[in-house]
Image (spheres, helix red, strand yellow):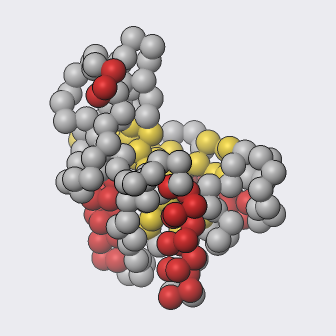
Amino acid sequence: LIVHTHGTEGFTSVDADRYPKDELSPRTTDTTKNVVGLGTELADALNSYGIPTVHCEIMHDEKSFLSAYSQSAKSIAEYIEKYPSIEYVIDLHRDSIVRTTNEKIKPAAEICGEKTAQIMFVIGTDAGGASHPEWRKNLTAALTIQKRIADDYPSLVRPLNLRSSRFNQQFTQGSFILEVGSCGNTY
């Protein structure tokens, strides 16, 4: 399952080094410029490799950023009920890395001669107090996937980010956030 807690996370439309404060972290409902469009591409790619994938295209942050995680939790639960064979939940995001000078960071790698955004796995734990006893299994799954990617494309993956919140990763033992690039990257 591919889901988007912050589906309106968009990418910059220009390749520049400095941005006005109101353009520091672009958000859009246009799926040709946000992570939902990337989710469609990822689902298509996984399906083409014989990995059955469903894609929830709801932008859970569209109406309220503050309730996005509770809204995406409802969607994840509904998808798992409808498709009980779901083993992995990929919450697809884009990072937001901005210097104090308003410079957007564009984490990128060169793969097969082309520039592409780097990716980062984010794993939630139970350190923040929410029940998530199986978080280490999500960590193992993400590290296994990250290693397989890094074996072929070492510059593509950023270091894994281990966090104290659980980020709706309690639903399966293969759940993680996948950050694709940052607000400085173009779509």
Which image quadrant is residue 27 in?
A: top left
Left or right, residue 86 beside residue 32:
right
Q: Residue drawn 64% across and 62% down? A: 169
The residue at the point 43 percent across, 34 percent down is: 96
* Rendered location of residue 104, percent (x, y): 36, 24
> Where residue 153 sits in the image (x, y, percent)?
42, 47
Residue 63 visible in rendering: yes
Q: Can residue 86 be seen in this view?
A: no
**In the image, what residue occupies the spot 81% across and 51% down?**
129
Identify which residue, 163 or 45, lies in the foreground: 163
Q: In this view, does 136 lie above or below 28?
A: below
Q: In which quarter of the image is residue 12?
A: top left
Report the side of 75 relative to 38 (left or right): right
Q: In which quarter of the image is residue 46?
A: bottom left
Q: Residue at x 44, y 39 (%)?
A: 95
Of all residues shown, which one is farthest toward the front?
63
Quarter of the image that includes the C terminus: top left
How many marks the image carries: the answer is 0
What x and y, as percent, mark residue 166?
Answer: 68, 55
Residue 173, above or below 29: below
Q: Position of residue 131 (x, y in %)?
A: 79, 61
Front-lying residue, 126 or 109? 126
